[in-house]
Image (tube, rainbow, N blue to C red):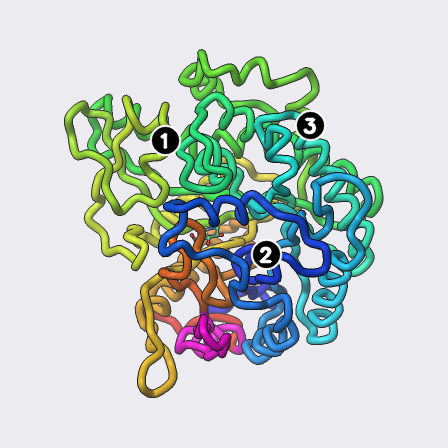
Amino acid sequence: MSFPEDFRWGAATAAYQIEGATAEDGRGPSVWDTFARTPGKVLGGDTGDVAVDHYHRYREDVALMADLGLRAYRFSVSWPRVQPDGAGTANTAGLDFYRRLVDALLEAGIEPWPTLYHWDLPQALEDAGGWPERETAHRFADYATIVHDALGDRVHHWTTINEPWCAAFLGYASGEHAPGRIDAAGSLRAAHHLMLGHGLAVEGMRARHPGNHFGAAVNLYAISPASGVDADLDAARRIDGMQNRFFLDPLLRGAYPADVLTDLEGFGLDEAIKDGDLATINQPVDHLGVNYYSRFTVTGVPGEATQAATSPFASHSPWVGSDFVRFVDGGRPVTGMGWEIDESGLLELLSRLHGEYPAVDLYITENGAGYDEELGGDDTVHDQDRIAYLDAHLRACHAAISEGVPLRGYFTWSLLDNFEWAWGYSKRFGLVHVDYATQRRVPKESARWYAGVIRHGGLPEGHR
Ligand code: IFM
């Protein structure tokens, strides 16, 4: 099962999850520094203060990537490293880190794919109101152009925001992620302003380097109603609306979905949307990043199964989860996160995206499986479950390409074990095991398997 010659084989990480060095070289505090220090917010009281020390070990990590044969590496830039207070002139020492990283990647023949916002908002901007404030979108666009001015001559693919659903709704509605606010109306404004920030940033960056490629990465799900009864169909419509279409439609069509706007009446979103915003959000983009992990099965029948532990981020949007939608067990095997494994959902999603939003190239910007793993006595991790997960999802990618879906690359989540947000260091997603006490890196079996896939440009025929 060969993939196209120019298919981008990659792996992904994010700044706060791997860099550490949170107080070095002038970096300012981010909302995640504050949140992680707040008792009870992160499992075990873990923080990103050291993480996997990538800030100091990036050369070793680039060498690991080269050993794996990665063609591209998706990382995120830490906004508070570049602008410690979220505004004003750049902190040169912070930008220099990304200059060094990009140079090391290019020297190793690995294409750098930066994401500008993977959730580490400068704390000063949160203190001024955070993403529910419109001004934050403008601050983000300024920051984006600073980074792009520094790297845009050598970096040609740019992702603006990562998973705005999480940043807005886990950050401001359920409070499970930083900054930990519980404010449904504020979370909707946050979502709108994240997308506005994306549009303003693309506009600014493209004006400077029209030849570069720009896009956003969204976390999308396959969604099934638990049955064909009207209440279940409506639950599926609602969760598809909030999870998928609420982001896809403004970004790619320039309009919020009408049914979702009706569902959200009374939450003040209308007042946040100013003339021209949707045209700004709907900047032409060169690619859409798809972060895919799982399928949701939902019911709207009152009194049916309550929140299933198996649904990532499921309970969380107060107005969506409480009255109309409940997540039920879809009866599939789960990863160590309790997330149901369903590669058919990825094929379904890719076909749908191509059918409904045809004009954009697609990349899988995240896909992977988290487990509680330990290094074995033979000094490796026999992560056959992860290999099976990746293999199945890559077969779905291959099927999508065979159907004509313009899927141009795949970035597995994640290169390294790292700080898994509210789960701290308890869940491991890496191809490479990290001993958090010594920072020693050991490629897992999945790393060797993925290197083989890249080397052969595909997978053997038939199922594993
Ligand atoms: O670790 C996260 C990543 O930061 C965003 N997408 C999901 C991953 C696994 O939870």
Is residue 192 left or right of 338 when viewed as pictured?
A: right
Q: Which numbered dot is residue 239?
A: 1
Image coordinates for residue 102, horizontal then vertical, percent: 72, 65
Residue 357 in which image quadrant: top right
Query: Reading the chain from its start, which is encountered first: label 3 or label 1?
Result: 3
Residue 421, relative to residue 176: is it above or below?
below
| Front-lying residue, 295 or 335 | 335
**Which residue in the protein does label 2 denote?**
15
Image coordinates for residue 139, horizontal then vertical, percent: 72, 35
Q: Residue type at mark 2: give it.
A: Ala
Circle 1 SS class:
helix
Query: Reading the chain from its start, which is encountered first: label 3 or label 2?
Result: 2
Instruction: Tell me how far mark 2 sits from mark 1, CA to CA.
Output: 29 Å
Q: Residue at x 45, y 71 (%)?
A: 436
Is residue 191 left or right of 429 when viewed as pictured?
A: right
Near mark 1 (Cα within 10 A), the count class, few <14, some 14-19 or many ≥20, is: many
Mark 3 vs 2: CB contact within 8 A = no
